[in-house]
Image: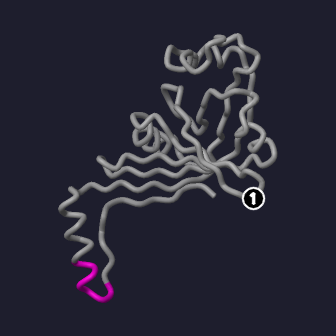
């Protein structure tokens, strides 16, 4: 797991990206699909609306281990988060996170019995943040290719949890 400060660092990286790719196992095959963040803060759990009847729900019930990846190429931000997925029908949470964007995907409204929330409790992850311009990154890669024992220094990389 991670400290409150580290959770804020992760949130700062992903909150504006908004859409992460959720990876579940479809039998033995990893399968990814985009999921839209609905919360305004992060304390170790991520929330996504879903249909109770969606394939990802059945996949997550068979194997609760999931992975989420977020990326913003322009800002050089890449985040991978792994954790456990659980479906909830908590009406208070559905009310709390419901918004007009979500409503567009659920024309029957928040009281539709198929509406649910997918809760991802993050257990571990890794993130990369490139602080330099694309030109500097290309320079670092070229320099590493010229020097035998060098690797490019493209910015920050950190693992946590697990």
Total count of labels: 1
In screen coordinates, is 113 left or right of 1?
Answer: right
Residue 107 drawn above or below residue 55: above
**Element assignment for label 1:** loop
Residues rendered magenta in the picture: 143-149
Name the one closer to the observer, 133 or 109: 109
Q: In which quarter of the image is the C terminus?
A: bottom right
Question: Residue visible at 59% across and 35% down?
Answer: 46
Residue 33 drawn above or below residue 93: below
* Residue 147 belongs to magenta span: yes
Q: What residue would you read off at disc 1? A: 28
* Residue 120 belongs to magenta span: no
In screen coordinates, is 46 left or right of 153?
Answer: right
Residue 76 drawn above or below residue 99: below
Question: Residue visible at 73% across and 20% down?
Answer: 90
Q: Which quarter of the figure has residue 57?
A: top right
């Amino acid at each position: 797991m991670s400290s409150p400060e580290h959770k804020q660092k992760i949130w700062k990286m992903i909150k504006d990206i908004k859409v992460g790719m959720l990876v579940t196992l479809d039998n033995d095959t990893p399968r990814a699909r985009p999921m839209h963040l609905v919360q305004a803060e992060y304390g170790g759990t991520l929330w996504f609306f879903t249909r109770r009847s969606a394939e990802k729900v059945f996949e997550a019930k068979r194997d609760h281990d999931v992975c989420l990846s977020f990326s913003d190429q322009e800002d050089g931000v890449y985040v991978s988060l792994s954790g456990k997925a659980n479906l909830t029908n908590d009406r208070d949470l559905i009310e709390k996170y419901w918004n007009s964007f979500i409503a567009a995907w659920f024309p029957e409204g928040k009281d539709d019995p198929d509406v649910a929330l997918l809760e991802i409790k993050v257990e571990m992850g890794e993130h990369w943040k490139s602080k330099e311009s694309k030109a500097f990154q290309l320079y670092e890669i070229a320099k590493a290719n010229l020097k035998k024992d060098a690797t490019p220094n493209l910015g920050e990389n950190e693992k946590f949890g697990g």
